[in-house]
Image: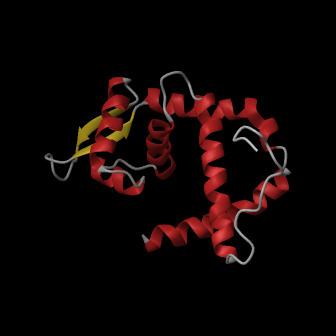
Amino acid sequence: MTARTRKKPAAAGLQGDPPEFAVLTEISIIAHLTDTAFARLLPAGLTTAQFAVLNHLLRLDVRQTIGELASALQVSQPTMSSTVRKLETKGLIMLEADPADGRIRRVRVTPAGEAIRQQSVGALGAARAQFAALSPKEWAALLPLLNKLRIALDAAR
């Protein structure tokens, strides 16, 4: 069988694997598939990493340093510096002095950044058919469990 031959989707793990491993493997596969699909929907020139920064700051309604962003998004500080620099060049974020300590610079999303985030989320509507495997009720039922798992994993890092 070649790498291009599709076969029936396999289970997330091997028989006998603990259920936690199978669930985390399934989440990892889903994350990869959704990142790839979402990347195709993003406005030209916006990467999933750049979208993640905008989404993180807007979702939490915060202004963070590059170091705080790097920690939150689990990337190195040089990687985050590069991502922030590209977002700043596009006018989607601004670096501003921290009011308590002017030596510290915090990342703030601009109105253009908010707009492109909304445009990106709106593009998901065009791909809704990909998500029809689950009903809206099933999607709603998944969210609390995934949220609980995310919070526990985030607290343990």
Residue 154: x and y, percent? 48, 67
Residue 65: tell me if it is visible. no
Tally of numbered discs: 0
Residue 106: x and y, percent? 28, 45
Of 26 and 149, nearer the camera is 26
Q: Quadrant of the C terminus?
A: bottom left
Residue 3: x and y, percent? 69, 41
- Point out the residue furthest to the left here: 103
The answer to whether residue 91 is left or right of residue 97 is right
Q: Quadrant of residue 96?
A: top left
Rendered image coloring scheme: secondary structure
Residue 69: tell me if it is visible. yes
**Where 92 sits versus 3, above or below?**
above
The answer to whether residue 14 is left or right of residue 79 is right
Of 98 and 48, nearer the camera is 48
**Where 81 sits versus 23, above or below?**
above
Picture residue at 40% right of the left edge, 55% below the top: 74
Picture residue at 61% right of the left edge, 69% below the top: 148
Q: Quadrant of the N terminus?
A: top right
Of 7 and 109, nearer the camera is 7
Residue 152: x and y, percent? 53, 72
- Point out the residue furthest to the front here: 1
Of 90 and 63, nearer the camera is 90
Picture residue at 44% right of the left edge, 36% below the top: 50
**Where 31 sits versus 119, above or below?**
below
The answer to whether residue 91 is left or right of residue 145 is left
Q: Quadrant of residue 88?
A: top left
Picture residue at 30% right of the left edge, 32% below the top: 85
